[in-house]
Amino acid sequence: MHKSSKSADEKGRRSGTVKPLKILALALVVAAVVRELRLPQEERTWHGALGGFVPYDFRMPTVDKIKSTFWNPEGSIIANRVFGVGWTINFGAVVAKVRSLIASR
């Protein structure tokens, strides 16, 4: 008999926290797609912001866009996602911030 490293209680608590976030993420994706589909076909851009706040982008990402999103030392630490809804981490900005903090010591 195989023993699981996590108890059923631990798994239940973790999945109970993640489920609402997954539902919210799915709802945002659906809302963004519906928003685009309500526009006439020639006006659809497949990128924008829900409620003027939550960014979305369903355009095919390019290598340059991926690089500039995840490694832009001069950008902000939080960046719009390359593909999908929401935000992501700009690791270039994180490294630049850490380096500047170390240099200022």
Image: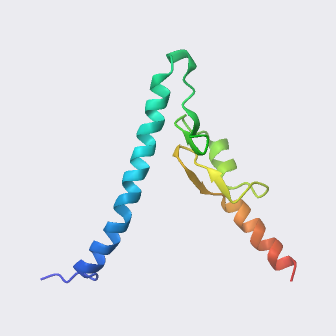
79 w.r.t. 61: above or below: below
Q: Is residue 70 visible?
A: no
Q: Is residue 7 left or right of residue 105?
A: left
Q: Is residue 32 visible?
A: yes
Which color scheme does this rendered protein use?
rainbow
Residue at the image point whose x is 46% and y is 23% from the top? 38
Q: Is residue 93 left or right of residue 81?
A: right
Q: Is residue 1 left or right of residue 20?
A: left
Residue at the image point whose x is 34% and y is 60% from the top? 19
> Residue 46: x and y, percent?
54, 31
User: In the picture, residue 98 is in which quadrant?
Assistant: bottom right
User: In the picture, residue 1 is in which quadrant?
Assistant: bottom left
> Residue 42: x and y, percent?
55, 16
Farthest residue, direction left: 1
Q: Is residue 80 left or right of residue 104?
A: left
> Residue 37: x and y, percent?
45, 25
Residue at the image point whose x is 83% and y is 72% from the top? 100
Farthest residue, direction front: 51
